[in-house]
C-alpha cells in the first residue's frame, strides 16, 4: 500500500514577514504551498497511492478556502481510485460540498472531521469509502 503524508501546509498563509524584503518574489512564495498540493495530488494519481494523509494546520485562509481545498482533495481521491482500478476518467471532475466540522475520535484521538453532503460529476456507488479512515468507519458515501 502506498500513501502520501504532508503536514502543516498553512495554505494561503499571508507570510507577513515577506513584506520586509522588497526584492522577494512575494506572490510566487505565497502561492508555493498551493502549487505543491496540486503536484502532490498529481503524484498520488500517477503513483496510484491508496490515500493521502494531511495533518496539522492545513489552511490559514477563511472557511471558503478550506472548503475548496477539501473539495480538491475529494476529487484527488476519486481520480486516484479510478487510476488504481484502470478506469479512464475522460472529463474534468468537479465537487461542491455542504460541510460542518465536528470533533470525532480516530484511533482514540480527538480530531476535526466533517459531516455533510457533496456533489460530484462522477457516479459513486452506495457505501463506497473515500479517503483516510475508511476501515474505521469514516469516509463512507451514501448516494441520495
Image (cartoon, grey):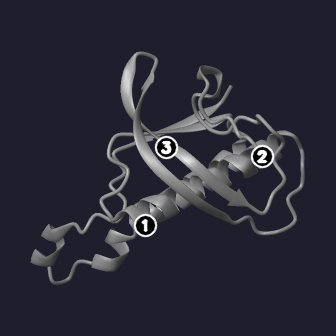
Query: Of marks 1 and 3, which one's residue comes earlier in the chain?
Result: 1
Residue 85: where, in percent of width, then height?
87, 40
Distance of mark 1 from mark 3, alpha carbons? 14 Å
Residue 8: where, in percent of width, then height?
33, 45
- At 21% from the left and 66% from the top, the residue drawn is 15
Whether pointer 3 and pointer 2 mark residues with C-beta atoms closer than 8 Å, the reply is no
* Numbered mark located on residue 114 in the image: 3
- Observer-nearest of 70 and 88: 70
- At 73% from the left and 41% from the top, the residue drawn is 142
Q: Could you classify mark 2 by the number of other residues whose Cα lies within 10 Å: few (under 14), some (14-19), or many (20 or more)?
A: few
Residue 137 in the image: above or below residue 115: above
Distance of mark 3 from mark 2, alpha carbons? 17 Å
Residue 16: where, in percent of width, then height?
16, 70
Residue that badge 1 annotates: 64
Residue 35: where, in percent of width, then height?
49, 65
* Numbered mark located on residue 8 in the image: none
Whether pointer 1 and pointer 3 mark residues with C-beta atoms closer than 8 Å, the reply is no
Q: Nearer the viewer, mark 1 or mark 2?
A: 2
Residue 116 in the image: above or below residue 2: below
Within the image, what quadrant is residue 102 found in? top left
Number of marks: 3
Q: Nearer the viewer, mark 3 or mark 2?
A: 2
Secondary structure at numbered mark 3: strand
Distance of mark 1 from mark 2, alpha carbons? 24 Å
Secondary structure at numbered mark 2: loop
Residue that badge 2 annotates: 143
Amino acid at each position: 500500500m502506498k500513501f502520501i503524508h504532508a503536514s502543516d501546509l498553512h495554505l494561503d498563509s499571508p507570510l507577513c514577514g515577506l513584506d520586509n524584503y522588497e526584492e522577494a518574489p512575494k506572490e510566487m512564495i505565497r502561492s508555493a504551498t498551493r502549487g505543491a498540493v496540486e503536484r502532490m495530488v498529481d503524484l498520488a494519481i500517477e503513483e496510484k497511492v491508496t490515500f493521502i494523509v494531511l495533518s496539522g494546520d492545513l489552511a490559514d485562509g477563511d472557511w471558503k478556502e478550506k472548503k475548496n481545498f477539501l473539495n480538491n482533495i475529494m476529487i484527488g481521491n476519486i481520480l486516484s481510485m479510478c487510476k488504481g482500478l484502470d478506469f479512464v476518467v475522460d472529463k474534468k471532475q468537479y465537487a461542491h460540498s455542504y460541510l460542518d466540522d465536528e470533533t470525532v475520535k480516530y484511533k482514540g484521538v480527538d480530531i476535526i472531521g466533517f459531516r455533510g453532503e457533496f456533489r460530484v460529476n462522477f457516479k459513486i456507488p452506495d457505501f463506497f469509502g473515500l479517503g483516510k479512515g475508511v476501515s474505521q468507519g469514516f469516509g463512507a458515501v451514501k448516494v441520495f
